[in-house]
Amino acid sequence: MIDTVVLFFVFCLIAGPVRSELKLPATLYDTLTVFLLLAIGLKGGEGLATQELSPLLPQLGAVIVLGVVQTLIA
């Protein structure tokens, strides 16, 4: 079965050129947003669960440093 995130991506690729007038109610839009974020997070979590931690430490450190710097600049 195709992944949910890929299905939404393909749907948006098709809806754009067709000039679809798709209007979603605000509550449905919010629900789909949360669902997609959860799906992406779970997919990434599954990938990280199979990785060894030591090669990821420099990347984790860089993300934390950039997050702090961006917060201080803003």
Image (tube, rainbow, N blue to C red):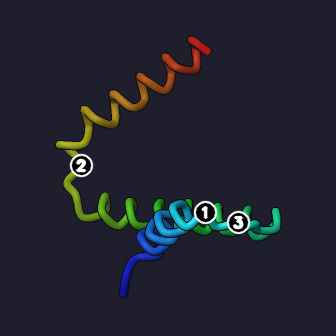
Question: Mark 3: which secondary structure?
Answer: loop
- Name the one closer to the observer, 21 or 74: 21
Per the rendering, the mark at residue 19 is: 1
Point out residue 27 in the picture as x, y percentages from the top left corner.
Answer: 81, 67
Question: Mark 1: which secondary structure?
Answer: loop
Locate the C terminus and report the quarter of the image it occupies: top right
Would you name the residue on which mark 3 appears?
21
> How far apart are the alpha carbons under marks 1 and 3?
6 Å
- Name the one closer to the observer, 8 or 38: 8
Q: How dense is the environment of label 1, judged by Cα within 10 Å: few (below 14), some, or many (20 and up)?
A: few
Q: Earlier in the sequence, mark 2 or mark 3?
A: 3
Label 3 amino acid? Glu
Per the rendering, the mark at residue 32 is: none
Q: Nearer the viewer, mark 2 or mark 3?
A: 3
User: What residue is rendered at 51% in x and 62% in y?
Assistant: 17
Point out residue 15 in the picture as x, y percentages from the top left corner.
Answer: 55, 67
Circles 1 and 3 in contact, beta carbons < 8 Å: yes
Q: How dense is the environment of label 2, judged by Cα within 10 Å: few (below 14), some, or many (20 and up)?
A: few
Would you name the residue on which mark 2 appears?
53
- Name the one closer to the observer, 73 or 17: 17
- Name the one closer to the observer, 6 or 15: 15
Q: Is residue 32 left or right of residue 28?
A: left
